[in-house]
Each structure stands twice: as C-alpha cells, then as structure tokens.
Amino acid sequence: MRQNLHNSLLWLTCLALFVVACKKEVDPISLSDDRTIKSFTFESLNPAIVGVVDSVAYTVRATVPAGTNLSQLSPAITLPPNATVSPASGDVRDFSKPVSYTVTSANGTAQTYVVTVTTASSVVNGGALIYLGGEDGNFFAIDAGTGAGKWRVSVGAAIASTAYIAAGMVFMGSSTGNLQAFDPQIGVQRWKFTTGAAILSSPVVSGKNLFFGSEDQNVYALDVLTGTQRWKFGTAGGVTSSPTVVNGTVYVASKDQTLYALDAATGTQRWKTGVGDKITSSPAVANGLVYIGSNDFNLYAFDAAAGGTAKWKFSTGGIVTASPTVTNGLVYIGSNDQTFYALDAASGVLRWKFGTGGAILSSATVANGLVYVGGNDNTIYALDAQSGVLRWKFGTGGAISSSPVVYNGFVYVSGQDTSLYCFNAATGVLRWKSPLGTRIMASPTLATTDLVPVVSGISGGLQ
C-alpha cells in the first residue's frame, strides 16, 4: 500500500513538472500572428533609403536617387520576433519591376507585400502628384515638378471635396453624392460608394476606415480597401465639415449647429456640443482641445476630455467657414470680415491680426516659420507666423477659397481663375501656372512618389 502511494505521488509530481515545462514552452511571442514588415531599408545607398511600409494595402514604396542600378539592390528587412520573409533580408533582387515578399509569422500565417521602387526625377518635386477636382466635374492629377497633367477623369458633377491619399488609392467626393476611390497613378476607379446627397466634406483615413460627411446629414465610415459601409451616424443637418480623427475619436460638425465626437470603430456618440449657428468649418485638435469656427462669427475651443465643455471663444466680425490650423501654441483662422487672426491656442487671446481685401474662406498652412493663406481678394499671402508681418503676396485672376499645400520648398494653391499655381515658398516667385479650364473650389492634395499624403491646412484630417 505504501509503495502504491509512493508511486502515485511520484507520478503526480512528474505530471506537474511536465505541465510546467509545457507552459514555459508556450511563449506568446513565439506563437504571434504578427506578419507585418516593420522596416524596409536600402542600407547600401548613401544616404540609406527607407521604404514607406503600408500594412493596410500591404505595399512598400521607395524612391532611390537617379542613376541607381535597380537590378542590384539588397534590402534590409526588419520583422516581428520569430517571423521569416522570402526572399530573405539582404538578398539581391531586381527592382526594375515590382517584387513580392512573403512574410510568415511565428504561428505560420503568411502575408505578401508588393515592393515598388522608383528613381527620383531630376526635376525638384517631379513625380510627386497634385490631386484636385473642378467645378466642371473633372478630377486631375498634375505633376508637382512641372505642372503637366498626368491624367484626368470626369465624375459628372462639380467637385468641392478635397482629395485624400491612403492605402495606395486617392479618394474624393462630388456633387453626385458619390465617394470614389481611384488608382493614383493612372486614374482607374477602384470602387464607388453612393450617399443620398452631394459630398462637400473631405474624406480622411485612419487605420482601415475612411470617414467623411454628406449633405444627406450623415457621417459615414467605410472600409478603405473595398468601400463597404462600416457605420453611419445621422445628424439633423448637412455635413459639409470634414472629419478629424484623433486617438480613436472622430470629431465632425454639422449644419445642425453641433460638433460631435464619435467612436471611430462603432460610430457611437461620445459627446456633442452646440453653437449659435450652422457649422461648415472643420475641427482641428491639439493638446486636448477641439477648435472650430461657426457662422455665428466665433471661433471656439472645446475640451475633448470633458465632454466638449467650452474653454473659450473668440468673436470676429463675420462668419467663420474657414478651418483653424494649430501649431506652436497658436491657432490661425480667417473670417469673412476680411481679417486673418493668430490667437493663443490655450487662452484664445489675440496675438496679432492681418487685414486683407476680401473674405477668407481658405484654411492656413504653416511651414518653415511662415503661414500661407488665400483670400477672396484674389491673393495668396505669406505672413511671418509669429508676428503676422507680410513676407510676400501674389495676385491671381480669381478668388482663392482653397487652402495651400507646402512641400519641399514650394507652395501649391488653386484658384477660381481656373488655374493651379506653384510658388517658391520662401520668396513667392511663380514657378509655374497650370490652366485647368474650370473653377477650382477644392484644395490641392499632394502625394509624394512613395504615395505619402501632404495635405493643405487642416480642413479635417488625421492628427
């Protein structure tokens, strides 16, 4: 009996040790499903070229210096722990055409990435593309280096929505009520989603979702790759305002005089707050505050964490349809009272103001110490961002209600005189002018050669 008890205890002890050993071997990292490329770098080039990894569209894009031999490149690839990739990191490959890499996770699941490498243009900003739509229903892709047209498609109705680049596609809305996705290189439609009224709101992408508003009074979230509806949220007015997505919250306003904070995953309302008139301005979010203009002549700052409690408001002499831009402790806003304001972002105290000759519908862009904004007096202005002193201005043939884009030393802006302009950002010297044959209400959006978006002043966006 004693021997049987001893054997039983010995067996139980061995079983316990076996279970403990098995638990130690089940390392969560070793069984990870993570099959993403963390970095993709051509370290042999000087300087090293880091590719842009898109783990939504599963692509990698890199632009290498002119003259690089694309057939003899060996990338260094960083992966999750215990994952593998084929072809292997460091293997020499011919990148004169796209190359596929398959990443296998620690638990055996696989994902293929397509890697595209291009050589840089000898023209500054050449190969980068400007996207914008016109009143005649044409949607354009323009070379940012030369002003030459790359492609054009007609969507059948006026375009006031500013385009957005993400997941290897360019997205835009139009007065048809359609939100469309196009191939950014050739303009072929990838998918289309139809709402019940015109789309003036500009789309924005966060993760795998695309967000925008419609004049049918709804805010929509779509699958960015397929255009399938994820959710929609109804308001009591048209949604001209463009969404801003911060930390899983979508901030967007409606003509029902309300600013909404919605859960980005579900569309559930987190809070809402009202103002004194309709809102067509788009929100900017910085340091926990949500800034937005209203047709009641005011710019507001609301506390995002306190359910939209008002922190301060600043009164102008006209309706505020422009969208605020916040940087370096200042918030910049234009008004229909023909004045451009710089306010302390925390308190709303006026720091400086600059008078123009027309209403300001354009949203500002700040870069390299200058703030750029267009006016309905047909002029684009470059002001010192800290003092408001005029650095340069340029008169065009029509009102500028669009917002400027600044990229690599140049500023791009479109006007109602039917042209897209490119200026030296520091001096205001005109580099080129591209006549498009239609009034332009939408702001330009730029995509680098690696399809990284460069957007205009905050008229909605991902922050």
Image (cartoon, rainbow, N blue to C red):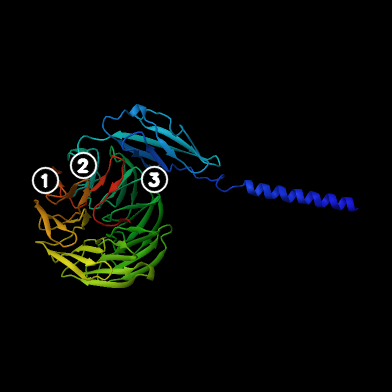
Under tag 3, what secondary structure? loop
Q: Which residue is mark 2?
A: 144
Q: Comparing marks 1 and 3, which lies closer to the viewer? A: 1
Hey, which quadrant is residue 337 in on the image?
A: bottom left
Amino acid, disc 1: Leu
Residue 89 pos. (x, y %): 44, 34
Asked if the residue at tag 2 contacts the one at tag 1, i.e. Cβ–Cβ closer than 8 Å, the answer is no
Amino acid, disc 3: Leu
**In the displayed structure, would residue 283 be above or below residue 410?**
below
Taking the view exactly as shown, the residue that stands out farthest to the right is 1
Asked if the residue at tag 2 contacts the one at tag 3, i.e. Cβ–Cβ closer than 8 Å, the answer is no
**Circle 1 crowding by C-alpha within 10 Å: few under 14, some 14–19, many from 20:** some
Badge 1 or badge 3: first in the primary sequence: 3
Badge 1 or badge 2: first in the primary sequence: 2
Cα distance between the residues tagged 1 and 3: 38 Å
Asked whether, in this view, residue 227 is left or right of residue 144, the answer is: right
Badge 3 or badge 2: first in the primary sequence: 2
Cα distance between the residues tagged 3 and 2: 26 Å
Residue 88 pos. (x, y %): 46, 33
Under tag 2, what secondary structure? loop
Q: Which residue is mark 3?
A: 225
Amino acid, disc 2: Ala
Question: Residue 430 shows which numbered tag?
Answer: 1
- Quadrant placement of the C terminus: bottom left
**Circle 2 crowding by C-alpha within 10 Å: few under 14, some 14–19, many from 20:** many
Residue 409 can be seen in this image = yes
